[in-house]
Image (cartoon, helix red, strand yellow):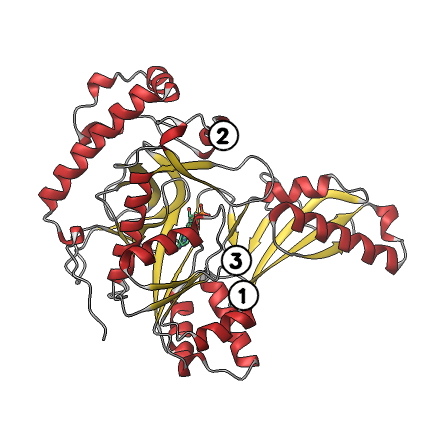
Amino acid sequence: MTRFLPVSNPDFMPPEHLRAIQEQRFLRTVHHVYRNVPWYRDKMRDHGVSIDEIRSLDDISKLPFIVKTDLRDTYPFGMFAVPMSEIVRLHASSGTTGKPIVVSYTQSDLDVWKRVVARALASFGVNNGDTLQNSFGYGLFTGGLGLHGGGEKHGVSVIPISGGNTERQIMLMRDFHATVISCTPSYFIHLMDKAREMGIKIADLSLRIGVFGAEPWTDEMRKRIESEAGIKAYDIYGLTEIVGPGVGAECTEQAGPHIFEDHFYPEIIDPDTLQPLPDGEFGELVFTTLSKKAMPLLRYRTRDITRIIPERCACGRTLRRIARISHRSDDMFIVRGVNVFPGQIESALLTLEGTLPNYQIILTRDNGLDNIEVQVELVPEKFDDTLKSLEALQKTISDKIQHTIGIRVKVKLVEPNRIPKSEGKAKRVVDQRNL
Ligand code: DLL
């Protein structure tokens, strides 16, 4: 028999109560990093702000921002605020070359993470009679272990299948009677297509809820998934630097992710002037972690563009919501859940002979699955080569890029001067996915 879990739920806290918790945790976090991380002391000194000036949450705007390169510059452990003996888990951002962003967790950090993911699952209507097929990748990526820990905490039966091997996924989904699946929305669309090819209708199986995130997706995709698979599709948001999945999650109203504000304090800033913007206005999302011990972050710029939805949600949660993330303020793009910077593709190309440093990345979505085509200009001499040698070059480039970013791309060789040269910043990425 299915028992609904009791929800002793901080999601519905009175706003004054929430604010008091945020304030207390914020001040504790600022003092914790100030005491334990020399980087923060230097940064605050350079910014001309003394620790004594930070007396309430309103003083947050006096603090400097943290950006991704700060985390690269302090690689690997320069932002840790506790000794290694207290750290029980390390994760890192996706991308297979270059220095990743490293994040760490104490036992209590893992506990907070599990709790927020459990709260996300509760808000989707998942309960302990459910079986969760967790098709997010396990490993350094936070998706797999994040949903895993939260699923167990919530009391559901977790199938730690990870990503890939789609036919097997479909077989287990059917045989294990999975009722919930978690993965990127584009992978789920691929899974639906594969099931159709295999003569299996997902709508005839036990699946009832999809937990989708790690990449932008649209309401059109949601409608397609819901009608074809006969499930409810919910958005879960997060990023490695802050905790992983579970920074925010939709409720059954499906009206934008609620931020778990008692642990992650959101601000929206103008990405050019860096000034805070009022609720309702679009800008860049910035987070301050309120309860992390191993690697707290103060005012981390996510680069995600969104707005805080000022209206209270019909579900009654007091946690504020954000509009679903549709794009970023940097040139990073996300394909099949993998974060890619054009520079990674560029550096792969630069190591190969026969190509010019003029390239363009075309992103398309075919039946819900993202494809990358990299168009590369050849040096003029190369263009007269035999078809065979051009095919070999095409394959070498494709292999090289796959080795660098971890996913297969289609390579198209084009003649010199085919790719439009821009006057200013080169337009490296042409996103035709209509996100
Ligand atoms: O993608 C963590 C995650 C795993 C979230 C599983 C949800 C589910 P990163 O690899 O660090 O972490 O990528 C973080 O992905 O800044 C957004 O740009 C994007 N992103 C994450 N969730 C969503 C979402 C994980 N629901 C970056 N909608 C973020 C749109 C999302 N974009």
> Does residue 367 show up?
no
Q: Which secondary structure lies at badge 3?
A: loop
| 364 and 154: which is toward the camera | 154
Query: In this image, 316 relative to 324: left or right?
Result: left
Report the disc number at residue 336: 3
**Badges 3 and 1: C-beta atoms under 8 Å apart?**
yes
Residue 282 can be seen, yes or no: yes
430 or 6: nearer the viewer: 6
Amino acid beneath label 2 = Pro
**Labelled disc at residue 76:** 2
Q: Around disc 1, counting alpha carbons within 10 Å, would you say few (fewer than 14), some (14 to 19), or many (20 or more)? A: some
Tag 1 residue:
369
Q: Is 278 on the left or on the right of 298, as rendered?
A: left
Q: Position of residue 307 (x, y in %)?
A: 30, 49
Query: Label 3 to label 1, Cα distance in Å?
Result: 8 Å
What residue type is disc 1 on?
Leu
Mark 1 CB near ligand 1 (8 Å cut): no
**Quadrant occupied by the N terminus:** bottom left
Q: Measure how far apart labels 2 and 3 are at the Cα level.
A: 26 Å
235 and 419: which is toward the camera: 235
Question: What type is the residue that disc 3 sits on?
Answer: Arg
